[in-house]
Image: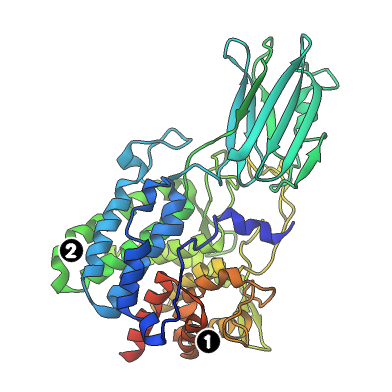
Amino acid sequence: MCFGIFLVFICGAGRTQTASSHLLDGDAKISAKRAVELYEKGYKEDPWVKHPDAATLAWGEFYTLQALVDLYEATEDRKYLDEVAFRGGRVLTHRDDKRGVTDGSGISRPAWTMGQDFVTAEAKLLDSKGRPVIELRSTTFDYNNSTRVVLEPIGHSRFNLVVSNERKKRTETFTNLSLNPSDDRYIEKIVNDPKAPPQAKPGSYTEKSNLLRVTKVHRGRRPGGQSLMLSPIPLAFMGYTGIIYDPMMRFAEVVKNNKKLSDLLPTADRFIRAAEETYSDAVPRLWRNGPGEDEGYYLCSEKGESFPWDNVGLPFNFLAKHVCTELALYRLTNKREYLDRSQKMINLFRNRLRYKSENNTYSWDYWYEPVTTTGWEPADGISENIRFLKPFSGPEDISHAAITISLVEAGYKMGVGFDKTDMKRFANTLLYNILQEDGISVSSDVAGQGKGQEYFPQIYGYLCLTEGNPRVYTTIKDAYLKWEREHLPFCAALLKWDNKAKK
């Protein structure tokens, strides 16, 4: 199992806009004036309008809101907070319960539904009267909404089935199928693969499907000729909520700690109340203690829900933003539950760090057990959607790790899990494993392997490691100046850390 396939599953961390730098000098490229110009040029509109999906908020609007809070911290100009108040309020109007929409559970939750490329998809094959005969459900972890099914009747009781996915460049052809369980060509026996892997290889196949599984739902009916696409099953995805709320909690803390911003208190309270509503709904369903003592995590989704990795713990980068949001909620509300869960998520990550004494660095995996250790068999009953998994492990890519590292920053600031020695080691990970000697090239993962230049726009996420070594700031700043493009979140983060250095 190639670790790289799972980089796609999280929708490409940091799909934010970049622009050519037009050969600006350092003072012009890293300035509040330039940040405003970048914002006006590419970030003013509500991305939800074109792409009404939770992924749009997590991998788009989140970065814009973070940049605006960073710009406030860099300049103390309240216009940036006013913009966060407006945009954050707009984000809340997109929540499922505010729009009156439900996910696949039939419940309208205080969260945001995703329902495009990264959920399970389904369909029903019908008879001539429009009644269901066969249920279809996808088995791969992505782009299931691109799977097409064509049924061709042949004779009185047999049919051919062609299953294809253009995105995966895969076609599966099953001929002379029957709905009789005692027949050698019984559809469930021929099509279903109990050990279908979560990734489908390209090519043409005639034995066992790696795109879907079928279930006969009615005896005595015969499916008619038809062609259809699998339809995504919407899900209010827990992985995105910590990400989306993080900048709103930063806003709330700024406002609560500055009497001059008292007129923004109602907005801050609204953000806090919204986040608490979401966690109140999610924790009873999705929080799990373990696997080790004083460890814990959130599930991707409940078992049987439409996230492909149902009943499996969220990867570290998602947990990181829950830590950021819940530690902020603890400071804002003084409710111990937020601190307790954060401590357990931090322990889960810390206990799986790998230390390399040669260069005094840390590295870590993208996920944890059982994904990285034992995997699972269908008989284990771990996941309804991905019923079989060969274990895989490998250092986290530097793009997702730029999010994961926020867990370290949040814990360090609270004195939870990490101390100055840890910050120095994480800083060395950036300086010696990730950034290369030319000051602009980057590795693919946190262990220093491969080439990952496509991830360069995300390295500003490591600026928090300046707490461990001041060289982190200057090195990342120099890299940005060498880069031939520009990036609002990158520029804003540099301005924030420059302001911190001056204090």
Residue 326: % across, % down:
38, 62
Amino acid at the residue labelled 1 = Lys
**Residue at image coords 61%, 87%:** 438
In front: mark 2 or mark 1?
Answer: 2
Above or below, 14 relative to 176? below
Question: For the residue carrying disc 2, how many other residues have a C-alpha within 10 Å: few (<14), some (14-19), or many (20+)?
Answer: some
**Residue at image coords 35%, 46%:** 95
Q: Is residue 285 left or right of residue 37?
A: right
Residue 455 falls in image quadrant: bottom right
Q: Which mark is residue 359?
A: none
Q: Is residue 467 visible?
A: yes
Q: Is residue 370 left or right of residue 183?
A: left
Q: Which residue is mark 2?
A: 264
Q: What element does badge 1 sit on? A: helix
Q: Is residue 328 visible?
A: no
Front residue of 436/336: it is 436
Of mark 2 and mark 1, the one earlier in the sequence is 2
Above or below, 72 relative to 290? below
Q: Which residue is mark 1?
A: 424
Above or below, 360 relative to 86? below
**Residue at image coords 52%, 43%:** 116
Amino acid at the residue labelled 2 = Leu
Contact between labelled residues 1 and 2, with CB atoms less than 8 Å apart: no
Residue 292: % across, % down:
59, 63
Residue 210: % across, % down:
73, 40
**Residue at image coords 18%, 58%:** 266
